[in-house]
Image (spheres, grey):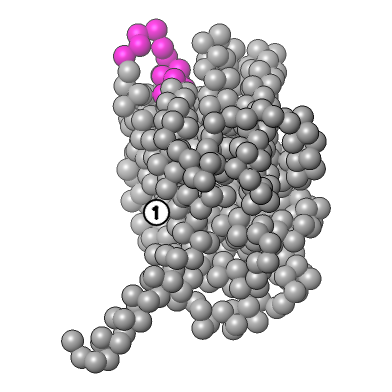
Amino acid sequence: MTVGQQIAAGGLRTRVRQAVADPMTRNSAAIMASTVLTSVLGYVFWMIAARHFDRDANGTAAATTSAIQATVLIASVGAAAALVEWLPRCTSADEWRRRVTTGFVTAVATAALGSVLVVGVFGVTTSTLPQLATPLSGILFCAACVFFAAGLVVDYVAMSEHRGSVLLARNMFLCGLRIPLIFVPVAFLTGAESILLAWTVAAGLSLAWSTATFGARDGRSLVPDFTGLGQNLREMASSLVGQHLITVTAMLAGYLLPVIVYSRLSATDNAYFYVTWMLGSVFFIVSPAVSAALFVEGAKVGTDMRQLLRKCILTIGALLAIPVLVYLTCGRLLLSLFGADYVVHGYTLLLLLTLSAVPDAITNVAVAVLRVSGRMGLALLLNGGMLVLCVVAAWFVLPYTGIVGAGVCWLASQTIGAAGVIAFWSRLTGSAPEELVEDARPVATGCVAP
């Protein structure tokens, strides 16, 4: 090895060590790794389901499991997200445990209430989700919502503590366990019920495992402490509401669209849509993960937001390039793994989702900056506007366009939101986009997640 090569290798090792030592990079990497690996396991699960059950069973189960995620998001995600803001402010281990307990109690209570309302309204009364009209499916649905809500709190606590390995392990356990559970031989279950059972049992076991193995650091553990619960709820109320609404409006469209497709088209159409949406969601892994890490680090007192923002932009840009290229060149091959008919019905939709990666990244970064700087109203306006535009447009256009219309509505809403962000970038961040990139060049290699 020449002297120049030795210097280059030494510089590379130094940059790798700097990246690993950076809390934002570690959190980003853990969140992305969790989402990528669990997405792969999700593809395997639905690939097996697609070949094991008929299209109607898969479409019905996809709508029901999407409703689980939507219910948890609407009812409980604010309690988990608020902990990212509140836990860094804790001055003692006892206060930390009380805050975490408040998050758990709020998330579980609202998830239980929300799930009962969904079963009553969309299952029994309107039959929008007919699977939930049966007692067994209704009970499984409510239990799954509670388990997922509590698991979400564990994930956010882990992010706040820079313990991304906990988040990664829990979600791997959750998604990996679903696969064997789908084959549990219960004779009286339909195909859709078998899928719902696998989701519910896996969620419960992963929650039990993660809480049992979380351990304690400096006295901070998941052992509940109900002291001053009412006072903590009052103190965190405004943060709970603000963080809740912002997070809900950011994520809700992804969970509502499968339900809308199921309602406006058919269970079979939803089977094609859901698998394609899962594949396309890989683009919605990178920017939300890095933006979430930006939010965690920015919540700390004395943080240099400009430096964090530069890292965030460069990391997202570097990590989006490969998946976009892969999907543009191998999209048909990926869809064919689920069956030849998925290529016919889903390829155009997959291309639209690929194109939406860039505007989605722009809006995610903007929302993270607004949350850190306390401008909750603007963050809510941005996310809420895109949500309403996407969902309302999809409801009306789907009968005429098929599942492709959902992709058009998603791309259009993200593009309009990104255009607004770019137009008001200086007001949002305090600098022009090109200034951030220019200033970031000296530190670019040290911030990209390994």
In the image, the segment drawn in magenta is: 185-199
Quarter occupied by residue 139: top right
Q: In which quarter of the image is residue 359?
A: bottom right
Instruction: Name the residue: 63% across, 39% down.
Output: 94
User: Is residue 194 inside the magenta stretch?
Assistant: yes
At 45% from the left and 76% from the top, the residue drawn is: 445
Q: Mark 1 points at which residue?
A: 331
Who is closer to the viewer here, 308 or 236? 236
Q: Using a 10 Å C-alpha cutoff, classify the residue at mark 1 as few (fewer than 14 neighbours), some (14 to 19) or many (20 or more).
A: many
User: How far across and how far down the image is residue 310, in percent?
Assistant: 59, 73
State left or right for residue 77 relative to residue 181: right
- Of residue 406 and residue 385, the one placed in the foreground of this image is 385
Q: In this view, does 69 lie above or below 164?
A: above
Q: Examine the rendering and report whether any part of residue 122 can be seen.
A: no
Residue 88 placed where, x, y %?
64, 52
- In the displayed structure, does residue 45 sit left or right of residue 144? left
In the rendered structure, which amino acid carries the disc numbered 1?
Gly
